[in-house]
Image: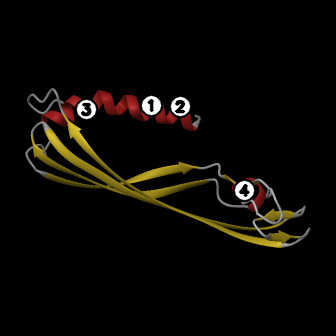
C-alpha cells in the first residue's frame, strides 16, 4: 500500500471513529489540552547564493546534490486553550534539522566561495516552525463541532 493510500485510509478511519470519540471525550470540559504527535516531513529544498563580485551562484538541491535527508519523522508538540466552548487559541511547534555530506562532481559557486571539483561539502539545514492560531467553532453541541 502506498504512503498516500495509507494516509487516506487513516483519515477515513478517523472520521468514522470521531462520533464515538466525541461522545466519550474525557477532555471535552478541559480548558487546556496538550498533545504530543508525529509529523512526517518530505522536503525538497533548492538554494542559491549570488555574489556581487562573482555573479549568479550555483543552484543546488540540498537533498540530491548535497546528500541531505529528504524525509524525516519528527515529534510535534501542540496545545489548545479553549477560552469558552466556541473560542480557543491553539498552537504547535515542530523542528526539522537535517545535514549531509557529499563529494561534489562539479564546481559549485555559493556566494563568494567556489568549491572545486571533488571537494567534500558538508551541509546543514535547520528549520523551526511555531504556529499560533485563533479557533472559532460556529457549531458546538454535545461534543460535536
Q: For mark 3, what is the residue?
A: 18
Residue 37 point in image, percent of width and height: 36, 53
Count of numbered labels shown in the rendering: 4
Residue 4's place in the image compared with 45, above or below, is: above
Residue 102 point in image, percent of width and height: 79, 67
Q: Secondary structure at mark 3?
A: helix
Tell which tag, 2 or 4, sits nearer the viewer.
4
Q: Is 15 on the left or on the right of 43, as rendered?
A: left
Q: Secondary structure at mark 4?
A: loop
Tell which tag, 4 or 3, sits nearer the viewer.
4
| Crowd band around label 3 with a 10 angstrom C-alpha radius: few (<14), some (14–19), many (20+) | few
Mark sitting on residue 5 = 2
Mark sitting on residue 88 = none
Work out which quarter of the rendered image holds the C terminus and state it: top left
**Residue at the extreme front of the image, as rendered:** 52
Q: For mark 1, what is the residue?
A: 9
Residue 74 point in image, percent of width and height: 47, 58
- Which residue occupies 86% across, 72% down? 119
- Which residue occupies 79% across, 58% down? 57
Q: For mark 4, what is the residue?
A: 48
Amino acid at each position: 500500500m502506498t504512503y498516500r493510500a495509507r494516509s487516506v485510509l487513516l483519515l477515513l478511519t478517523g472520521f468514522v471513529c470521531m462520533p464515538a470519540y466525541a461522545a466519550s471525550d474525557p477532555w471535552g470540559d478541559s480548558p487546556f489540552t496538550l498533545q504530543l504527535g508525529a509529523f512526517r516531513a518530505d522536503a525538497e529544498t533548492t538554494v542559491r547564493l549570488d555574489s556581487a563580485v562573482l555573479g549568479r551562484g550555483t543552484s543546488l538541491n540540498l537533498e540530491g546534490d548535497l546528500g541531505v535527508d529528504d524525509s524525516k519523522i519528527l515529534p510535534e508538540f501542540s496545545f489548545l486553550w479553549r477560552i469558552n466552548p466556541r473560542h480557543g487559541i491553539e498552537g504547535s511547534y515542530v523542528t526539522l534539522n537535517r545535514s549531509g555530506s557529499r563529494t561534489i562532481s562539479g564546481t559549485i559557486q555559493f556566494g563568494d566561495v567556489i568549491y572545486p571539483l571533488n571537494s567534500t561539502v558538508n551541509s546543514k539545514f535547520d528549520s523551526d516552525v511555531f504556529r499560533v492560531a485563533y479557533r472559532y467553532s460556529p457549531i458546538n453541541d454535545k461534543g460535536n463541532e
